[in-house]
Image (cartoon, rainbow, N blue to C red):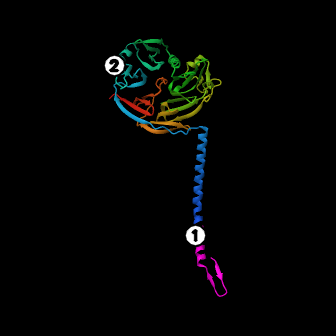
Amino acid sequence: MRVHISRNHFWINESILTFEKTTLLKSRTLRSLIPLVVMTMKYVIILSAFLFCLSCSEEKGEDIFVPASFQVDSTIISLNYTPRDIIQYKDGYLCRVRRYHEDSMDLIYLNNQFEIQYDFSRTLNESLGKGVNAIWTSNDTLFAIQGYRYYEVSYWANNNWQVVDSGSMTKENYMHQEQNYPIFEDENYVVSSCCKGEFGGAVYFKDKSSQRIFSCEATCIAGVHKIGGSYFVTSSLAHGSGFAKLIEIRDPKKLYEIKDQKQLLDCSWYDIYPDDPRDQISHPVGYTSSRGLEILLDTMGVFILGSFNFENHLYHIYSDMNNAYIGYQNNGVLIPIDTIYNKPMWLSEVRDLEHNANIFPIRSREMKGIILIEGNKLKIVEFTNE
């Protein structure tokens, strides 16, 4: 406030007083706005940094991953058999089923509407021995392992089963045959695997040019996919609370090289058990569990039913003890996109992943069935024998 003095009297300039009041109010208002301005500037800086990083990513050609959305359809079909394994064969599906009585079939063939084709099913079973342990295709040829004590490997040709290997008294023969039929193949490698459940499993990369074999631990294979020059191997086992693992192999030649024939007959060749159980388990010279690979996921409490490639990204169908989900891996964690079924799903089999990459059989206690994947569409078929 400003005071003017003259010879006769002094007076206060009202306009000046009004101006001073207004100025004081504005200064107080500005002081109250300071925290808001600071906060606003903070978010402006964060947004600017994000846009800068985004522009950098675009300049480097990096993709920002946005998970796909999937359509899920489910149906229940009555089937008087309990499928243990399902593979695509011809225009339908071949099922290895549980035998309930002496006249039961070990294999049944379903058309693409999941109806049993009895004539072809009976033909498949006529020359087949008892106790089918596994079925798969390799280069469009159907193979089966059968037997209880002696394991016999046969293939289907000219409406009859032709014996490849007459078997032996140990399951080493079974493992040997598993490793000789490819589950995945590209221009450089033939990939095979074996599974001994909670006792171990392995994946084998056979170099087509040199015939050398490179291997690492993988129990039990649920997917092999080549994306961007790397091999992504998914493994999982429904034992205890379940566990799942995803590894990336950029160069299979950097894995441990198998040179000893005994290692090829041992599904858990990487563990050498001592004669004295009090001693520690040892490993082959030069072997480490992380040699030649990067572990992207190693978790317990879930089981991966299968993995599939959609638009050059790897997705997983996985389950806990209550539900099944579709999701993806990020920073060592499975991120769910959606719950696809309110029952647990799992399967532990060495399968022909090359010819059945988008077919996931289900064999859990609560559910038997199959998931068919076509693009971003999932069809869940549950079999009941009620």
Q: Residues within 10 Å of mark 1 (few under 14, many from 20)?
A: few
Q: Is residue 252 above or below residue 162?
A: below
- Taking 74 as reference, is 86 above or below it? above
Q: Identify the residue shown where x is 59% and y is 50%.
A: 46
Q: Residues under labels 2 and 1: Cα distance?
A: 93 Å
> Would residue 180 be seen by someone viewing this image from the given angle?
yes
Could you tell me which secondary element the residue under label 1 belongs to? helix
Please state the extent of the stretch shown in magenta in the rendering.
1-28
Name which residue lies at 45% across and 14% down. Answer: 154
Which mark sits nearer the N-terminus, 2 or 1? Answer: 1
Is disc 2 surrounded by few (<14), some (14 to 19) or many (20+) residues within 10 Å? few
Q: Quadrant of residue 23?
A: bottom right
- Is residue 129 shown in magenta? no
> Looking at this view, is 124 or 18 the one in front?
18
Question: According to the image, label 2 marks what residue?
Answer: 118
**Which quarter of the figure is the C terminus placed in?**
top left
Residue at label 1?
Answer: 25
Q: Quadrant of the N terminus?
A: bottom right
Residue 254 horizontal/vertical position (percent): 63, 25
Q: Amino acid at mark 1?
A: Leu
Q: Which marked residue is nearer to the observer: mark 2 or mark 1?
A: 1
* Residue positioned 46% across, 20% down in the render: 136
Q: Which mark is residue 305?
A: none
Percent position of residue 103, x then y: 34, 17
Q: Please give the name of the residue rendered at 55% of the width and 24% of the height, measured from the top-left corner.
A: 203
Residue 26 within the segment the image draws in magenta: yes
- Determine the image quadrant of residue 55: top right
Residue 230, given in percent of the width and then of the height, sits at: 58, 29
